[in-house]
Amino acid sequence: MKSKSVLSCAFALVLALGTGAAQESNGTRILFHVTSVRQENAPNDCPAADCEATRFTVEGYAEVRHDGALIDLVLRCSEILVGKPSPHYAVTCGRVHAHNDYDATLYADTIYFADGPKKKPEGAPPEALYRIMSEKEADKKTR
């Protein structure tokens, strides 16, 4: 019974955060430059006892208004691995790496890293958006 509640909580998390595919048409397209990526175990992010969570923290900047001004952003996403009935990911986070630019879609308080028009395999876990933890106008940077 616990695995059903874990899945229900994980799906509620995905619905609360939204999926990139579901919201693609409503956001602002940006180019996001990643400056750092960290990952850590995040047991408090698990919705139930039988799961593991990995929290990804991404820092970078983007030109949001296409006017030359850059915005520094700190983003966070938690990936959930459920143990039962067999180990599987209930929610994944898009993978990005420092010193790279990524096409992304900016929403009110989240960012989705688009990985192009390729279709996900059937049965692939939903991909959560990265939540914006902080943002500020950046000092002048040279791209």
Image (cartoon, rainbow, N blue to C red):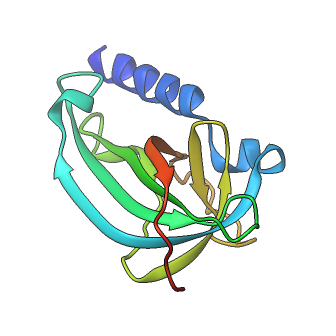
Single out the residue that lies furthest toward the right: 25
On-image quarter of the N terminus? top left
41 sits left or right of 109 in the view: left
Residue at image x 50%, y 73%?
140
User: Whole-percent x and y of residue 139?
Assistant: 46, 66
Rendered position, 3 above or below 117? above
Residue at image x 29%, y 42%?
86
User: Whole-percent x and y of residue 79?
Assistant: 35, 46
Residue at image x 51%, y 85%?
142
Of the pair 20 and 132, the residue shown nearer to us: 132
On-image quarter of the C terminus? bottom right
Of the pair 128 and 70, the residue shown nearer to us: 70
User: Whole-percent x and y of residue 43?
Assistant: 16, 34
69 sits left or right of 53 in the view: right
Rendered position, 18 above or below 114? above
User: Whole-percent x and y of residue 6?
Assistant: 34, 23
Q: Quadrant of residue 26?
A: top right
